[in-house]
Amino acid sequence: MVLTPGPNMMYLVTRSIGQGRRAGLVSLAGTGVGFVVYMLMANLGLAVVFVAVPWLFIGVKAAGVVYLAHLAWQALRPGGRGVFEVADLPRDSSARLFSMGLVTNLLNPKAAIMYLTLIPQFIDPNRGHHFAQGLTLGTLQITVSMIVNASLIVGAATVAGFLTRSPRWAIWQRRVTGTLLGCVAVVLAREVPARARV
């Protein structure tokens, strides 16, 4: 899931390319706080709402599927843009970079779906306290996400430069990204909780 391009990755990479690694890392700190907010909300009871009200679960999941399909289309359509394509962005202060990273993540349906629908499926009632398991899984996801995104930030300028000099690689990067996003959307669309089946 972390390697699947989404709003966070696009924002972090474009900031890193346009304003430097420091800007990307400050933005990453904001997205990290957004993950913590989602993790705490999910573990404080929102996951229970989705179990109690299956149609709400399906609604959130459908929104996520539509969003992933939209990202896939943006990457695959003629003239579409890839994650690593260079774009001119205005220079922002550290506070603005942090807050934009936070807001980008809080409005990211991929993050919402992960914490509210995916992670709760790995909580095992026989292994102890639900809250502790949720925090452990959430912390693991945040750690993996921060490491992967920090690596992308550090390498963003190099990758973007390579793709700018090699248009064929840029096209293949968009095709692979779009195909992966489309596959994830199809897999999510096929998974319906047992209680919600008609």
Image: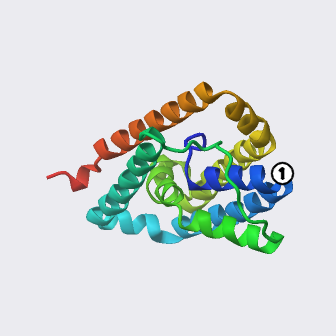
- Disc 1: CA contacts within 10 A as few (<14), some (14-19) or many (>=20): many
Quick one: 112 or 63, which is closer to the camera?
Answer: 63
Residue 158 locus on image (x, y percent): 79, 36
Quick one: 113 or 72, which is closer to the camera?
Answer: 72
When the figure is inspected, residue 109 is found, relative to residue 185, above or below; the finding is below
Quick one: 117 or 6, which is closer to the camera?
Answer: 6
Where the N terminus falls, by quadrant? top right
Q: Residue 93 vs residue 121: left or right? A: right
Q: Residue at x 71, y 49 (%)?
A: 143
User: Residue 4 lies in what quarter of the image?
Assistant: top right
Q: Residue at x 45, y 47 (%)?
A: 74
Q: Residue 15 vs residue 79: left or right? A: right
**Residue wearing tag 1:** 21
Q: Residue at x 23, y 55 (%)?
A: 196
Residue 126 locus on image (x, y percent): 49, 49
Three-letter amino acid code at disc 1? Arg
Residue 182 locus on image (x, y percent): 40, 39
User: Residue 57 lies in what quarter of the image?
Assistant: bottom left
Q: Residue at x 37, y 51 (%)?
A: 65
Question: In the orientation shown, which residue stands out farthest toward the right?
Answer: 22
Q: Secondary structure at mark 1?
A: helix
